């Protein structure tokens, strides 16, 4: 980039020197409760997609048309001379290393594509139209190799390997120990092992090398009823209104990136790693985003755009089309098998879980999702005996990434459906069965944590009271569900507050505003702690040159963490002068071999209830009532809390009934909003909710709490009519396929099955850390995703 190229004000809040303007403007995104009409409604927001740098060119990615293979050549003869083409040769010539947020398995461009849509080349052109034409004229030759798409096929001993090795990432997103299984498609496995052994009252950890099914055999032998079920969830799309958009330029040896990301400091670190720079030489600025839902965590288009800017010697801009957004990152498909044992009086005695997370072509944050699925699948219940094996599995589908509900959605669907099946087998009320076994204050969770600030019973009762349990016809069913979800632990948050020359206070924090009300949250909190009016507070745009470190804007952690950091910063400022600094950290983490430790500094707790009609002729589910109750502790912004809860419910409703990405030979067949259905205003008229708060309680996040319990609440309502649907979404076809039949045995046996299961594919192997172990994937059908019926004791 020439020195004469104009340098824009990247943040919209600071001068080119990085110092605060004398009168900084409020950051957009605040609701009417703070400063008039929300500018998101009046088109008053300047998003990353709206931004531009003078003199910029435009990047278009050339994507693989095969799900697995090797690039054998490029033909670019039809391109105009001014077009710049980037290939894997340029990446290798620049010495750019592999990267990834938890496993270093990605390259900026690849010569070995691993899914349809993988980035194999890129073109840079002076206009968006020229870039689009140029990309279409690049011809790529491939040598195709075998592919695998299903997570259960991918764990078979003879499965085609997607990656030959698994190298742990250097990113601080790899915040727990990885356990890849070399020579397999498993890039991470996570375990929970607890059992009441040797007559002791407190749970003891099963050693990492013990066979959990042998240890738990006696516990299951004591069960009067055993339920054993397999459930499936599909890939799903985030569908943010704003697609991914990145602007990049190099200025005096520094990389400056304007991008919509939920992880500005992770982005800075990862870009510094890729380009061999000090983190301080990378600047990441995050404008307000038009939605994210997890799709804008970690590197998406930023690295290739930065490389393009360096090669072109000018600013470069990349904006994805909607079909590219669909393929860029998805929610992880998953298969979950749960084995639950209970006494005749309803007491839960043991739980065994096998969870398989289809992370697609690259690990991304799949290992973290597998870990969250593990303990969320245990649920908010007391158990003396628990064994969980959760696997993150490579396939040749588009990569899975963070998604609202982060692992809890997949496992809560399975675990809460199993509770209702158990209630049916025992012949007891499903609400009462839950109440009998719920964790309460002071109880010990399967990870060894003592529960605090726990309100599961109140949430369950609130949801159950929202629907009438009087029978009102053969077509009408009711159901409930309850869940817990952890916040990322460990994590850190910092905040600064500056007293400006005009007497106002400027909040500096890296919390990204995606439309969830982050700006208003920071404004309200600062005003409360400073004992001033909200009009005296402004919030600067996240800019890694100006704001202090924050782990990320994910995991419903921002309000919880920033409330504490801002409280410290305000106290520091009021006591010591014009600048206040606050820092908080949540320590913890889990042993990947035993699942013991601190999974979450506090628990997101929620419940849901549903009342549905099912048309026996068409299989159509009609929602009559959908209710959710979420624990918030202390509410900062009541209106915003209501909107967050309602939005979570709507996403849960879409997950339950509509949303599914479909593939044919690895090719996504519905990457558009005509063929991919999301919930609309016509679907949500019957929803209502409650945000539960308690005076003096700590702040709990609300961004995801109502997502996971909604699908199983609807599924349990449908199942109460005899339709035992095990795969999401519950389409009319699947409902009809699950129609009750005379030959379906719904009686409970009193003869328990003492052997855990036939394990035809149990195998000994070695972790990358050298420990020997035995994995048993139970008797899952690894050849297909056919729904599996219930095994009875």
Image: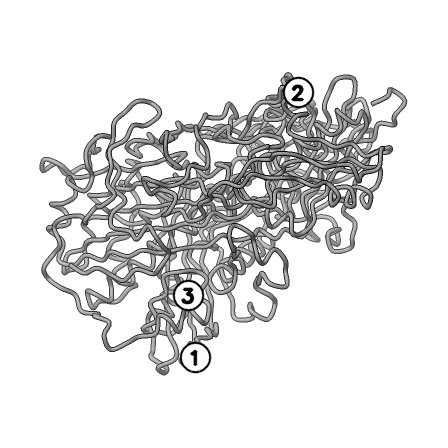
Chain-order first, disc 1 or disc 2:
2
Residue at image x 30%, y 36%?
191
Question: Which one is in front, 506 or 648?
Answer: 648
**In what quadrant of the picture does the N terminus appear?**
top right
Label 3 crowd (10 A; few <14 / some 14-19 / many >=20): many
Chain-order first, disc 1 or disc 3:
1
Residue where numbered disc 1 is placed = 615
Residue where numbered disc 3 is placed = 714
Q: Horizontal and vertical percent for residue 494?
A: 57, 28
Point out which mark residue 93 bears: 2
Quadrant of the rendered image containing residue 286: top right
Label 1 crowd (10 A; few <14 / some 14-19 / many >=20): some
Q: Horizontal and vertical percent for residue 405?
A: 48, 48
Q: Horizontal and vertical percent for residue 10?
A: 77, 31
In the structure shown, which secondary structural element does the residue marked by tag 2 occupy? helix
Q: Are marks 2 and 3 in contact (CB under 8 Å)?
A: no
- The answer to whether 532 appears left or right of 15 in the picture is left
* Residue 539 visible in the picture: no
* Residue 714 visible in the picture: yes
- The answer to whether 195 appears left or right of 9 in the picture is left
**In what quadrant of the picture does the C terminus appear?**
bottom left
């Amino acid at each position: 980039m020439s020195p004469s190229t104009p340098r824009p004000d990247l943040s919209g809040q600071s001068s080119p020197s990085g110092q605060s303007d004398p009168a900084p403007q409020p950051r957009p995104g605040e609701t009417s409760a703070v400063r008039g009409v929300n500018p998101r409604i009046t088109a008053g927001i300047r998003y990353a997609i709206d931004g531009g740098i003078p003199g910029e060119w435009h990047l278009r990615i050339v994507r693989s048309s095969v799900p697995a293979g090797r690039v054998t050549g490029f033909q670019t003869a039809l391109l105009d001379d001014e077009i710049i083409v980037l290939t894997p040769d340029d990446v290798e010539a620049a010495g750019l290393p592999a990267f990834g947020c938890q496993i270093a398995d990605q390259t900026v461009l690849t010569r070995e594509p691993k899914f349809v849509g993988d980035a194999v080349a890129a073109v840079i052109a002076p206009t968006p139209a020229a870039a689009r034409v140029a990309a279409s004229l690049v011809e790529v030759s491939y040598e195709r190799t075998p592919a695998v798409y299903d997570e259960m096929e991918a764990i078979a001993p003879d499965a085609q390997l997607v990656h030959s090795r698994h190298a742990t990432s250097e990113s601080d997103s790899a915040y727990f120990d990885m356990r890849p299984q070399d020579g397999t498609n498993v890039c991470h496995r996570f375990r929970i092992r607890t059992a009441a052994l040797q007559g002791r009252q407190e749970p003891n950890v099963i050693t990492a090398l013990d066979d959990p099914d042998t240890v738990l055999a006696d516990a299951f032998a004591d069960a009067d009823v055993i339920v054993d079920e397999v459930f499936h969830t599909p890939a799903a799309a985030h569908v943010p209104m704003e697609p991914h958009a990145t602007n990049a330029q190099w200025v005096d040896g520094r990389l400056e990136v304007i991008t919509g990301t939920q992880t500005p400091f992770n982005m800075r670190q990862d870009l510094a790693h890729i380009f061999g720079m000090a983190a301080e030489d990378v600047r990441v600025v995050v404008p307000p985003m038009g939605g994210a839902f997890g799709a804008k965590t970690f590197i998406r288009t930023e690295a290739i755009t930065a490389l393009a800017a360096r090669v072109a010697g000018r600013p470069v801009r990349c904006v994805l089309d909607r079909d590219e957004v669909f393929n860029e990152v998805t929610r992880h498909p998953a298969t979950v098998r749960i084995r639950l044992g209970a006494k005749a009086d309803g007491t839960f005695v043991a739980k065994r879980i096998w969870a398989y997370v289809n992370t697609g072509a690259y690990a991304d944050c799949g290992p973290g999702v597998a870990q969250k699925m593990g303990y969320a699948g245990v649920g908010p219940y007391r158990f003396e005996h628990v064994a969980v094996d959760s696997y993150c599995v490579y396939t040749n589908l588009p990569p899975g990434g963070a998604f609202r509900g982060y692992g809890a959605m997949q496992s809560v669907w399975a675990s809460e459906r199993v509770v209702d099946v158990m209630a049916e087998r025992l012949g007891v009320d499903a609400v009462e069965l839950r109440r009998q076994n719920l964790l309460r204050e002071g109880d010990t969770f399967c990870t060894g944590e003592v529960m605090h600030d726990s309100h599961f019973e109140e949430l369950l009762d609130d949801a159950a009271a929202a629907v009438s349990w009087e029978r009102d016809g053969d077509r009408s069913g009711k159901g409930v569900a309850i869940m817990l979800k952890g916040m990322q632990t460990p994590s850190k948050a910092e905040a600064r507050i500056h007293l400006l020359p005009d007497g106002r206070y400027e909040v500096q924090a890296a919390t990204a505003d995606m439309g969830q009300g982050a700006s208003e949250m920071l404004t309200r909190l600062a005003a409360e702690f400073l004992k001033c009016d909200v009009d005296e507070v402004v919030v600067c745009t996240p800019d890694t040159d100006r704001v202090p470190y924050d782990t990320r804007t994910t995991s419903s952690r921002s309000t919880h963490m920033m409330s504490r950091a801002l409280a410290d910063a305000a106290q520091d400022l009021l006591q010591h002068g014009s600048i206040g600094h606050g820092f908080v950290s949540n320590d913890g983490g889990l042993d990947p071999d035993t699942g013991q430790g601190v999974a979450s500094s506090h628990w997101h707790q929620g419940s849901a209830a549903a009342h549905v009609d099912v048309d026996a002729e068409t299989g159509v589910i009609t929602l009559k009532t959908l209710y959710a109750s979420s624990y918030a502790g202390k509410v900062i912004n009541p209106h915003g809390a209501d909107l967050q809860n309602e939005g979570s419910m709507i996403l849960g409703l879409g997950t339950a009934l509509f949303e599914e990405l479909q593939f044919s030979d690895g090719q996504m067949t519905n990457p558009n909003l005509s063929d991919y259905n999301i919930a609309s205003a016509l679907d949500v008229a019957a929803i209502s909710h409650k945000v539960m708060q308690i005076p003096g309680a700590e702040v709990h996040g609300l961004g995801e709490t109502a997502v996971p319990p909604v699908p199983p609440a609807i599924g349990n309502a449908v199942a109460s009519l005899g339709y035992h649907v095990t795969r999401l979404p519950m389409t009319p076809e699947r409902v009809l396929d699950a129609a009750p039949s005379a030959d379906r045995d719904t009686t409970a046996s009193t003869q328990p099955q003492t052997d855990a299961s036939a394990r035809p594919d149990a195998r000994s192997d070695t972790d990358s850390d050298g420990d020997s172990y035995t994995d048993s994937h139970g008797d899952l059908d690894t050849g297909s995703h056919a729904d599996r019926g219930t095994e009875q004791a």
